[in-house]
Image (cartoon, grey):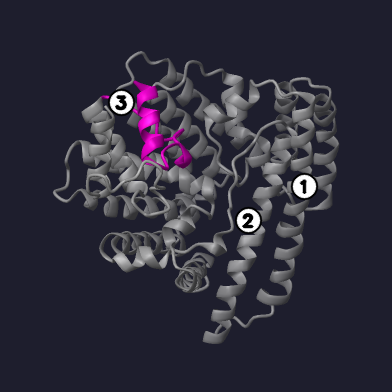
Amino acid sequence: MIPYQGLLFFYVTGLLLLPAVVLGLLGKPLKYYGLFFTAAMLVFIFSENGQLLALAAFCIWQALMCKLFFRLKNKSRVKFRVAATLSLIPLVIAKLSGILPGLGFWGLLGISYMTFRAVQVLIDAYDGKLDALPLAELSYFVLFFPSVAAGPIDRYRRFSGDLNRRISREEYAELLRRGIWKLMFGLLSGIVISGLILRIWLEPLPENGIAATVSYMYGYTFYLFFNFAGYSSMAIGTAYILGVKLPENFDMPFLSVDMKDFWSRWHISLSSWLRDYVYTRFVMGALKSRRFKNRRTSSYIGYAVTFAIMGAWHGLTPAYLLYGVYHGILMCINEALDLHWKYFKQMKRGKWARIILTVVTFHLFSFGLLIFSGRMV
Amino acid sequence: MEYKIMQILNEVCGAEDGELKPDLDLFETGLLDSFAVVQLLVEFEERLHVTLDIETLRREDIATPALIVRLLEKMR
């Protein structure tokens, strides 16, 4: 079963959320019921084709990595790299199995998202930012049901802070109100609107031809936005009802004036993860060790590397890899324009020039999504 | 301390002395971007021995020179 689809899913979720609502409105802690809710929903969702077993094995593996590494007294860089590599292995196998038919299929729903959450715990431990790492909280964080399948990708310390914070009745009532609102908006966007776009726009389009492909590019961009933003909104809404303020994933991406702006508005929890743990660390390392003659070189290479990883994280098919390279190039061009073309900065502040930039940016990312859709390669 | 902070800020933003007014929004004006923020953190660490946590640092905490000075003085 796929989360946030079908009447049965919403019926079961609604029923299982009711005790959380009662507890929250009584001002009681939601952590323990939340854990039970996640366990029950995982059994419900992953019950087919041995997925539950795969999920359990995956979770034990990640918990083992995180706990063992956390307990190490001397967390050297080498040990961190070994732990992070081991943590990434299931994801790499799953991605490889998608392109190598000989391997059989090793897919596990949400593995990309769960892995990034686990790796983030390892990074926090390596940075010495964790005082404690209780197994129950760690597993709850990695498997947190509302966002298990497709994010948003939360951060451990933020998540743990929410779990251990006392929420007053009044505050919970407000969380509940916003949660239900987000669920409703998500239903409208992720199921009704995206479903309509799929039915009346994308499905009737012929498979070939330039006009059809151009139309598909626009249709698919809107479809993916409404579908994914709606899905994220439903996940965030469900999390609010459990007392967890999952981070937002979209912030009006169609208003972006350039690609840097776009990536601060589209799939935010992924782009900020990559910004904090790949781009920033790469640039910081390069600056500290004075690796490049021109300091900005580290930024260009940082963008290329970050977005190549972003593409591969989606999958190892040519379409996803190309999508990553495409965005890496666009970000480098964006960086060069920011640095060397003074008029570009002025344009972003001017009223009419902003409109033009917004339209151009829209077409740039729409074309990226056309690559992503796999219709071209 | 404030002088040193402003010196680093001027260098990173490529600005002249006195050009950066205390309440100037550094992101709105395009003087700071992701790269410049990382550069700023490296300089603060190396020259002032103050380490800021980039993951919990929000843009609104370092949006203006005055806010940056206040934050760093609090950190020390």
Label 3 secondary element: loop
Find disc 2 in the rendering and name its residue. A228
Which element carries disc 1, helix, strand or loop?
Answer: helix
Judged left or right of residue A61, residue A290 is: left
Task: Name which residue type carries label 3.
Answer: Val
Q: Secondary structure at mark 2?
A: helix
Q: CA distance from mark 1 to mark 2?
A: 17 Å
Between circles 1 and 3, the one closer to the viewer is 3
Figure check: A226 above or below A58: below
> Which of the chains bears the disc numbered 3?
B
The region drawn magenta spans B49-76
The residue sitting at 72% across, 43% down in the picture is A237
Nearer the observer, B60 or A359: B60
- Residue bearing the label numbered 1: A181
Q: With A30 as the anchor, is A349 left or right in this view?
A: left
The amino acid on which the numbered mark 2 sits, given as a three-letter code, is Phe
